[in-house]
Image (cartoon, rainbow, N blue to C red):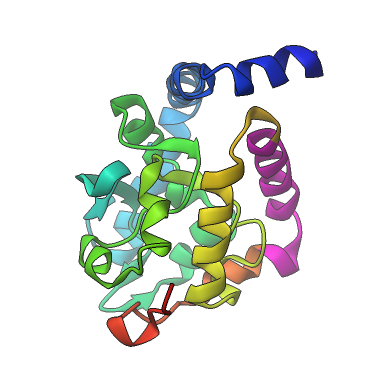
Amino acid sequence: MSTFITRIDQGGMYSVIKSILDRLIAAILIILGVFPVLLLGWVGSLMDRSSILFRQVRSGKSGKPFTLYKLRTMKEGEVTPFGRFLRRWSIDELPQLWNIVKGDMSLVGPRPLLVEYDAHYSAVQKRRLEVKPGITGLSQVNGRNSIGWERRFELDVQYVEKQSFWLDCKILMKTMVQLFDKKSSDFHLNQLPKFSEQQKRSD
C-alpha cells in the first residue's frame, strides 16, 4: 500500500487524485452533516440575532479570490458564547466543505487568508499560494493561532514543498486528535493580529 501511494506521489498524479478525493469526501460529509450544521447555525442565529453564515472574500490558489463560508461566531467584533462552542469543535468551518466541492479549497492546505495580505508576502511566503487552501493544514496542527505569522508561513511553505498523501493523512489524523485535546483546541480561540508589510521578512 505504501509503495502504491509513493508511486502516485512521485508520478505526478497526486494533485489530480487529491482533487477528486477532496470533492468526493466533502460531498459525502455534506450529505451526512447538512441538517445538524444547519440546525446549529439556526440556533446560533436565534441566540445572537444575526445571519447564519459568515461570508468573506479570501485568496485561493494563485491568488484567485473566492468567497469563503463559515458559521457566524462573532457579533460586533466579539466572539459570542455560542461562537466559542462552534470554534472549540471547529464546527464553524464545516460550510467550507461547499468550498471544496466548488473547487476553491482542499481538505488539507494552507489556510485561506485575506486577499489584502497577498501584497505583503515575501517571495518565499507567496509560495503558499501555489496550492489550494485547506480547512486544516500543517500550521493548524502545529500551534494554530498560538504561533506568529513568520512561523505559520514557514510551515505553509514546508507543506507546499513536501506535500504528499502520507503528509495529508498525518495532518488529518492529527487534526482529529487535537479536536479532543482541550489545550490544542483552545489555540484557535486566540485571535492573530492582522498581517502587514512590517511583518514581512527578507528572503
- To which quarter of the image does residue 73 belong? bottom left
Overall secondary structure of the magenta section? helix
The quadrant of the picture occupied by the N terminus is top right
At a point 66% along the width and 48% down the height, the residue shown is: 175
- To which quarter of the image does residue 143 belong? bottom right
Coordinates of residue 16 in the picture (x, y in percent): 45, 18
Span highlighted in magenta in the image: 167-184
At a point 62% along the width and 22% down the height, the residue shown is: 10
Position of 29 compared to 171: left or right?
left
**Vertical order, 177 against 143 (above or below):** above
**Vertical order, 157 against 170 (above or below):** below
**Vertical order, 35 against 108 (above or below):** above
Extreme residue toward the bottom, this view: 198
The quadrant of the picture occupied by the C terminus is bottom left
Nearest the viewer among 31 and 17 is: 17
Task: Report if residue 55 is visible in the image.
Answer: no
At a point 29% along the width and 27% down the height, the residue shown is: 102
Nearest the viewer among 111 and 52 is: 111
Coordinates of residue 137 in the picture (x, y in percent): 56, 49
Q: Does 56 lie within the magenta span?
A: no
Coordinates of residue 44 in the picture (x, y in percent): 37, 56
At a point 48% along the width and 45% down the height, the residue shown is: 135
Nearest the viewer among 60 and 7 is: 7
